[in-house]
Image (tube, rainbow, N blue to C red):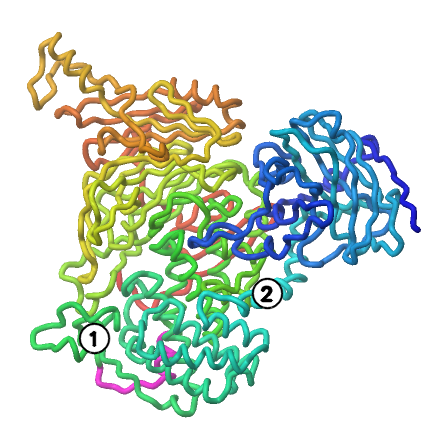
Amino acid sequence: MHHKRIVTLTLGAAACATSLTATGTEHLDNYTEAARLFGVAPATQHIDNDLSKRLKAPYYFVAGHKSYKTPGFSYDFADKQNGDFSVTYTPGASKNADKFGFMTNLWGHYADLDTSYSLKFDLKTEGTSDAHNNWQVQLVDADGKSAVGTLTGTHTQGTWKTFSLRLSDLEQEAGFDLDTIKLCEFQTENFPKGALLKFDFARFESDNGTVVGITDKTIEQRIAEQQATQAVRVQKAFEAAAKKAHEPIITAFAMLHLNQDLTKANQFIREDCVEMLHEDPWSLLTTPMYCRLYFLFSNRCGEYQGRLEPETEKLLLETIWERTKHKNDIHWARQSTWYLDGSENHDLNAKACNLVSSRIFMNEPDYKDRAYPDYGFGGGYHYGRAGYYGKGVDASTREGGGRANLNDGKTYNAEDHYNEWLSFMKEYFRERAKHGFFVENSSSTYAKHTMNMIDLAYAYSGDDELHQIIDDFMTLYWADYVQTGIAGISGGPKTRHHKKVGGYDANTGMLTSLLGGPADAGIWNYWSNVNGYELPKIVQMMALDRKGMGNFVYQSRGIGESEPAQPRPLGTERTLIINPDSKFLKYSYVTPSYTLNTQMDHPWALQSHLSKAGRWHGMTVAQDANARIVPVYLPAEPDFRGKKAAFSLEGMFKTFQHNNTLIVQRSRSFSEVNPDWYPLYKQRSDQGVYIGDAWDEQIEQGGWVFLRRGDVYGGVRVVLWDAAFEAEKKKKNGGTQAHFHGAHDEPTVKLHDKPYSYTDDRKFIVLQDRLAPVIIQAGDQQQYGSFEAFMAATQQAPIALHKTVVPTFNILTFTPPQENAPEMVFNAANNEIPMLNNDYINYEHPMTFDSPYLKSEYESGKIQIQYGGETLDLDFSGKPRWAFWK
């Protein structure tokens, strides 16, 4: 029998400096990975017993689907030793499991170690006792063999300490392999209720200072691991999809990619083609999927030839032709790239599919000489047949489109179409890089659809120049996102962010795999596993080093404003005509622990049916995706569908932000113009502010509602005059007429102490007056020192409602609680442009992107990304075909 020698390892052995100090190399956390490394287990199992569940994607709430999260483990962004966060273990949440600990990696990618290495980590324990001052430690290799020892001093009494396990000092089972150390497991006495354990910077470190990160890694190590594990991550994702997917066509795609069950996969595809031949031509899944199936698996030009049966391939081509021949109108390819049919993601779906399907057919003998219908009616083919097509036109004979007559009498084949759409798409992406991306900005659901269509053109356009343009565009997209996206929580203002105030969103799931997390081969992300795109080092550094980025303001131009054209050009009946020179200013204040965000619209901005849909403004907190402050509408009646939701984001606000202060007010009025098919309706609603129930503290004081989550603070102030006090003052002092203030009245009114109530679940503040402005003030411990100091400073900040001529219509002034802060002047009576001190804000910002790390002069197309000593220049300065909007 092999006898184990128990070695006691004390704190003194871990006092040496790490290579982080010695070399200055940054070791970064990864929110997609760290919590997955940790686990618990009963005495008879290992802590990776639930690994298959931990590796499912998406890890977070995405589109209503919840995935597994390791019980008892979370992040602490305030209390940490290295990187952006520590990993907190709450033993009570795991019912005091017998074992707890962490894996050294998730994907079987092990470090080359020898006896000169030690396993090190930082630890802080709270709520423990002397009974927990010794932990039994077991390292387990990939074959299940172990090496054991004891840690002493683990009752740290609320202070951080560094521990070290020298591998050569552990008692090793025969055959234990240092090069495949898989698990580090701990055992000790049961912890008392409320105990917390915090881990940070777990790593292997050699005597010469070489560091192999486990929880915190250099960016070079992370990128090397992403590349080394890509194949296995994708393989696992497709294996899961092949067993169970939302749609049979997704299962078929996974089977073909795995080269398994090909007969069944082909059957699924044929059945799908028969069902979808004439159904839902605007499906966001179907046509892009069919095009990918062709380019990956067809016998003529597939990357993996021979996996489609001839019968399947023939039916697939027939189906793609029937689904695209009407929408693929060459005359529409010659119009402005700022014409959007239906919604933005559907528009890009049609146009990307037009490009890619044209490429398919121009190389297929049975299709390359076919003529397209090319009616020239305009945009929106198949986007519903309802509507007026002109006197004497029988709508039942039409395939949709508008009332234009763009047909030039010529006949065009697939190659003609391909060349036109190729030119169109190059301009499409350059123009958006110059002016400010998408109308559906950071949509919680539609972002993944838009990226799906971008990827389709990226992977299968067949043109090297367009491929590079889109590669750069995707880099720009993610560089923009990570300015305000902290730990997978999307900050920044959002559009078409329907029915959702908190949680994670589509960008979170898409970015996970790019950062080395589990791949997703589900219905909306399967495509991201096969396109070959890699996230550049500089963007990854920004995504994972929020502490290094510090506090900053990010301003950028938004798009979505309609071209003020009435009557609308014929052919655009189903189309949004965008004015790319929109007077929309996106504004975010970003810190390592929270963001505050809005889009400020010029009072004369002409809103479109997309620009005003699902508008999200507010505060996010890195510590919890549901700890938010979000202005909302509270419906007072059912909508046109007969449904009454608890809250709505389908409302417009006048907003004004400076640094970490945001003022919002329900819009008194705004202008809009819509395509003929889009319903213009109003729904009576009250005004509210979502605060949720994820905050650690909530205190009402001095007219404010104060909130704390970890080291992040928020304050909400509903600003309304005290009508009863003012009425009583009039009685005492004589004075004014009923409808006008008097010439000698005081210039300001008394503020109401509590002009709000709560919904029954207390997740929403309900305004007493739906047109009262609301101040949202953000802060954190770094800025104020304590929650109490934040509350005191905020309450002392000067605030006033200045009278205009008519009672109840006031001008709000507020000076934020920072040294030398400017006065914010907000006219709550009408649509006057707000002012900082005596200067009006400028909605036409001279930069398309403007943060310390992402810069581009407006319309230049020249973009520079810079961070951590790295610089990346992107160039989208190609000239447009012609300037439609000038």
Q: Nearer the viewer, mark 1 or mark 2?
A: 2
Residue sitting at 21 percent across and 47 percent down?
638
Q: Which residues are magenta?
A: 408-421
Q: Is residue 412 magenta?
A: yes
Q: Which residue is mark 1?
A: 377
Tell me if 471 is positioned left or right of 186 in this view.
left
Question: Percent position (x, y) of residue 130?
Answer: 75, 25
Q: Is residue 336 magenta?
A: no
Question: Percent position (x, y) of residue 652?
Answer: 26, 43
Residue sitting at 31 percent across and 71 percent down?
280
Query: Number of marks in the image?
Result: 2
Q: Which residue is mark 2?
A: 234
155 is higher (above) or lower (below) than 636: above
Question: Percent position (x, y) of residue 646?
Answer: 30, 42
Describe the element under mark 1 as helix, strand or loop. Answer: loop
Q: Amino acid at mark 1?
A: Phe
Q: Is residue 552 visible?
A: no
Residue sitting at 61 percent across and 62 percent down?
233
